[in-house]
Image (cartoon, rainbow, N blue to C red):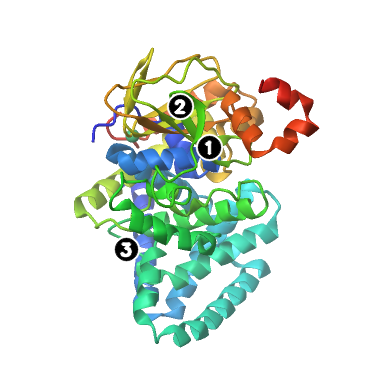
Amino acid sequence: MTVNYHPSTELLTAYAAGSIPLSQALCLAAHIEMCDSCKQNYKRLRGLGAFMFGQGSEQEHAASRETNAHKNLRQQVFAQIEQDKAVESTQEKAPALLQSQLQEDHLGKDHLGKGRLSSRRNKADAGVKTQTRIPKCLQQFIPTSYEDLPWQRVSPSIKQVNLCSDANGAQVALLKIKPGGSSGHHTHMGDEYTMVLKGAFSDETGIFQQGDFIVRDKKHRHRPIATKDSECICLTVVEAPIQFTGYFSRWLNPLLRLIHPSYAMQNQ
Amino acid sequence: MSKSTLNAQSQEAVAAHLEECMRRTAQKRDKAAFGELFDHYAPLLRAYSLAREPGAMLVADELAQTVLVKVWNKAQTFDKQKASLNTWIYTLARNSRIDMLRRNSRYTMEIDPEFLWAEEVDEQADPFVAVQQKRAEDTIANAFQHLPIEQQEVLTKVYLEGKSHQESAEELKLPLGTVKSRIRLAIQKLQVLVGR
Ligand SMILES: [Zn+2]
């Protein structure tokens, strides 16, 4: 696959450092799954983080090792691995299971909330074989296929589905544009990150194909048009959501319209 | 022999020794070897946590404990063909920090970070890539000390303190654009990236 538009150096650096909002990380992860060059560069940037992590004053570290805090922590960690060992030995009856668990756990993939999503993910694994491949990072939101999502009509040529929101208020959504359709002119309050998952679209600045990653800032006013031969599905992360969101929340929450007259006005 | 060459050699020796400790931890479940890993990495892990939250000793201990218990439990999954020991442990630390930030609501609970950082779980180890990676790491180690202080400063904000570009700009009292260009310049000087 030829990917032509990549995240900037400084964005990829922030991603490697883990110092960006998860919504942006999601968008970058989707790109990296489709882009070998960014994957390789991500690993090298992660290597820089590892180097900095491993630096520091050897004197200070040596002093730190002599503190009671260090000795207490050592005791606690050894106590915990003893305890875990007891649990481990009861699990030895199912070595195959343990082995697959270990494989899966390589490199810190042991995040919170795993149990919550594992059943959804199993369904996703079964689904992807026949569909357009859904990036691994998005399978938590797209359990079976793009088609099965609760798409909401935004305009005659556009459908949208909101996936989640971030702690900073950013909205993560998928947009589906009909072949040859346009999303219309729009601007936004904050930055907008777009990742083309399927098909292609163009605007005043170029043609964007599957795998491409684009950032638009708030000054940018643009009018994306899907190519004629197929529909286009994009992942978008909008820092300060645009008007589509108003439409969607009106659908979801008619009460809000009653409580907030401004809501009804804005959506007339 | 120059001082920095000597220094690099002793660092190589330390790294090789720690890798041997890791091998014994994984294959023999050797607690003495694990103890050496603990003594080396606990101060680094606490420093990493304290860089983000100065003075938060309990948080630092929690992060160090979480990561070191993982090092013991997941020792068999470590593969030095895929990533160096430092990289492996740094990645565990970075991910644990993200988990902790989610728990105290600074990161969203709506997004599961499990598959957000493309790690080499399902990849075959490629010796060629491993050699390249090692060479890149050596270049970084040699060039880092020659970076201008202001470039080291922004990298520290982003990598160790876990600050966003915006936060870094505010704390360093610099325009956002300056923070970004300093990062770009530093990455260029360290020759981190290929193909750009
Ligand atoms: Zn790329």
Identify which residue, B26 or A215, lies in the foreground.
Answer: A215
**Do marks 3 and 1 share a subunit?**
no
How dense is the environment of label 2, judged by Cα within 10 Å: few (below 14), some, or many (20 and up)? Answer: many
Instruction: Name the amino acid type tagged 1.
Output: Val
User: In which quadrant of the rendered image does the C terminus of chain B lie?
Assistant: top left
Chain for mark 2? A
How dense is the environment of label 1, judged by Cα within 10 Å: few (below 14), some, or many (20 and up)? Answer: many
Provide residue A117's location: percent of width, then percent of height.
50, 59
Residue at 53%, 33% in the rendered image: B154
**Do marks 1 and 2 share a subunit?**
yes
**Do marks 2 and 3 share a subunit?**
no
Query: Which residue is denoted by mark 2 in the rendering?
Result: A158
Residue B172 lies in quadrant: top right
* Gap between marks 3 and 1 measured at Cα: 35 Å
Instruction: Name the amino acid type tagged 3.
Output: Asp
Instruction: Name the amino acid type tagged 2.
Output: Ile
Query: Which residue is denoted by mark 3 in the rendering?
Result: B79
Q: Secondary structure at mark 3?
A: loop
- The answer to whether mark 1 and mark 2 are in CB contact below 8 A is no
Left or right: where does residue B49 sit relative to residue B116? right
Location of residue A111 with respect to B148 vertically, above or below: below
Figure quadrant, ligand 1: top left
Mark nearer the viewer, 2 or 3: 2
Chain for mark 1? A
Please indicate, yes or no, whether residue A12 appears anywhere in the rendered image. Answer: yes
Please indicate, yes or no, whether residue B183 appears anywhere in the rendered image. Answer: no
- The answer to whether mark 3 and mark 1 are in CB contact below 8 A is no
Q: Secondary structure at mark 2?
A: strand
Identify which residue, A205 or A245, lies in the foreground.
Answer: A245
Location of residue B58 with respect to A198 vertically, above or below: below
Residue at 20%, 55% in the rendered image: B127
Q: Is mark 2 within 8 Å of ligand 1?
A: no
